[in-house]
């Protein structure tokens, strides 16, 4: 049974930090590109960050570049998102996803096979 479970969300003041984690099970984690997406109320889900299967290639949305860092641990089947200098516009439900691609280029959301249920991040100004 495939599972992706996010954790680490919460309420934080603007300028603060949060670290999201996503633990995967039920599939071959090390051959999947992992990504983080987010969806704010009334908006479509948007790309946040992506990490390739070996962790060597990362992509970020322009809105989070320089503030967020994605990482993965293939031995622990975990992908993390370190979020610093948070802004009110970062408020959203954050989802991790898994795509059967090497991740050498940005993988569209439609190519993702698996998704977690999401974790809420709220940044107060």
Image: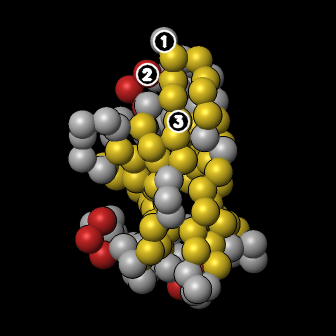
**Residue at label 2?**
88
Spot occupied by residue 125 in the image (x, y as percentages of width and height): 48, 12
In the depicted view, which residue is nearer to us: 3 or 32?
3
**Residue at label 1?**
125
CA distance for labels 3 and 2: 10 Å
Mark 3 is surrounded, within 10 Å at the Cα level, by few (under 14), some (14 to 19) or many (20 or more) other residues, namely many
Q: Residue at x 34, y 37 (%)?
A: 40
Q: Residue furthest top?
A: 125
Q: Residue at x 50, y 63 (%)?
A: 116
* 115 lies left or right of 42: right
CA distance for labels 1 and 2: 6 Å
**Marker disc for residue 121:** 3
Q: Is residue 57 visible?
A: no
Quadrant in the rendering for residue 89: top left
For marks 3 and 2 on the same chain, the one whose residue lies earlier in the sequence: 2
Spot occupied by residue 79 in the image (x, y as percentages of width and height): 62, 62
């Amino acid at each position: 049974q495939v599972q992706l479970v996010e954790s680490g969300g919460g309420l934080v003041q603007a300028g603060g930090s949060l670290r999201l984690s996503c633990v995967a099970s039920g599939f071959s984690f090390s051959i999947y590109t992992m990504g983080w997406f987010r969806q704010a109320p009334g908006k479509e889900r948007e790309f946040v960050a992506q990490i390739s299967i070996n962790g060597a290639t990362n992509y970020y949305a322009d809105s989070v570049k320089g503030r967020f860092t994605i990482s993965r641990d293939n031995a622990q089947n975990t992908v993390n998102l370190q979020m610093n200098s948070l802004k009110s516009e970062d408020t959203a439900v954050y989802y991790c996803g898994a795509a059967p691609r090497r991740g050498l280029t940005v993988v569209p959301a439609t190519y993702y096979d698996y998704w977690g249920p999401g974790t809420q991040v709220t940044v107060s100004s």
